[in-house]
Image (cartoon, grey):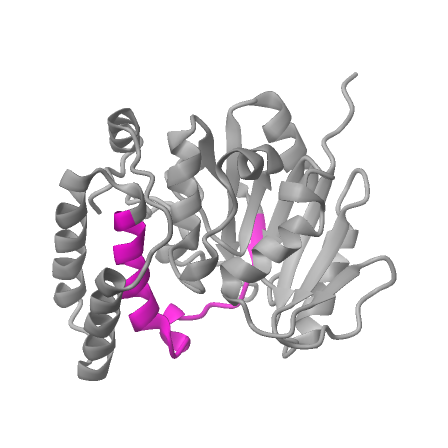
Amino acid sequence: MSTPLKVGAVIITMGNRPEELRALLDSVAKQDGDRIEVVVVGNGAPVPDVPAGVRTVELPENLGIPGGRNVGIEAFGPSGADVDVLLFLDDDGSLPNTDTAELCRQAFTADPKLGIISFRIADPETGITQRRHVPRLRASDPMRSSRVTTFLGGANAVRTQVVAEVGGLPDEFFYAHEETDLAWRALDAGWMIDYRADMVLHHPTTAPSRHAIYHRMVARNRVWLARRNLPALLVPVYLGIWMLLTLARRPSGPALKAWFGGFKEGWSTPCGPRRPMKWRTVWRLTRLGRPPVI
């Protein structure tokens, strides 16, 4: 029999949810199979007390979500090489089932081209999965698993071989769309992404706009995402469609002002290296139900 895949977990925290963090760590410790080594990254804040055996890294400044998670990856060796799979979990979530890690091992073992798994996020009180937490256009049935073209940042598992091949999350994004940037690079390299309804993270229902930087970062990073990854012909199409969708949602005046400020910033500031995806990847995304223009 083959050796079971080694699984680690990366959790970033601002140190302001110690009870929720402890509950998450307890749920990771209860997972079936081999022990999961955990690294908690204090993103510009001290790490609260954690159980024995949990490693911690405290950063002197907040590097943002992708920057903090990248530090967590490297805590497992270059590109996370000390383990085969890394779980990325929000510090105010928890794993209600004890078989999630084992299901990940089975999925990655069964499909050598599976690179990323996106978990289902459900409210612990109501059991409801918000539509925005289903990473596909046809999101009405969150209980249906499928191939997808992106994944949820705080509830996923990534094969470390993907990180070694295409790189980690884009540090400069700080917050928003960093998952799609990694997903597109992984898909362009031939990896697949699955949404699994049976792998669940409990997380209280929230609105992304609770973050003060939400509207600016969403717009700026949308432009960066396109500039970095799309063939030149698709960049104006993608951004034009998203501008129309944003206007159709009728955001408040301050929100719209922040959005346009971020949109301008996305064009006027460096976005990192440009590596446009192959046209066959565009077709592949289209066949998966989400062409890279929306």
Q: Main secondary structure of the magenta part?
A: helix
Question: What residue occupies the far top of the structure in this picture?
Answer: 1
Quadrant of the frame with the N terminus: top right
Residue 96 visible in the picture:
no
Q: Position of residue 190 (x, y in %)?
A: 43, 26
Return the residue nearer the eye: 94 or 125: 94
- For image coordinates 18% across by 64% down, the residue present is 246
Toward which corner of the image does residue 177 lie, by quadrant? bottom left
Q: Is residue 211 magenta?
A: yes
Q: Position of residue 127 (x, y in %)?
A: 51, 58
Q: Name above or below for residue 117 compared with residue 279.
A: below
Residue 3 visible in the picture:
yes
Q: Is residue 61 left or right of residue 83?
A: left
Q: Is residue 74 magenta?
A: no
Q: Name above or below for residue 147 compared with residue 128.
A: above
- For image coordinates 62% across by 63% down, the residue present is 12
Question: What residue occupies the far bottom of the structure in this picture?
Answer: 254
Q: Position of residue 64 (x, y in %)?
A: 51, 66
- For image coordinates 71% across by 44% down, the residue present is 77
Return the residue nearer the eye: 15 or 146: 15
Q: Position of residue 272 (x, y in %)?
A: 37, 52
Q: Which residues are magenta?
A: 200-227
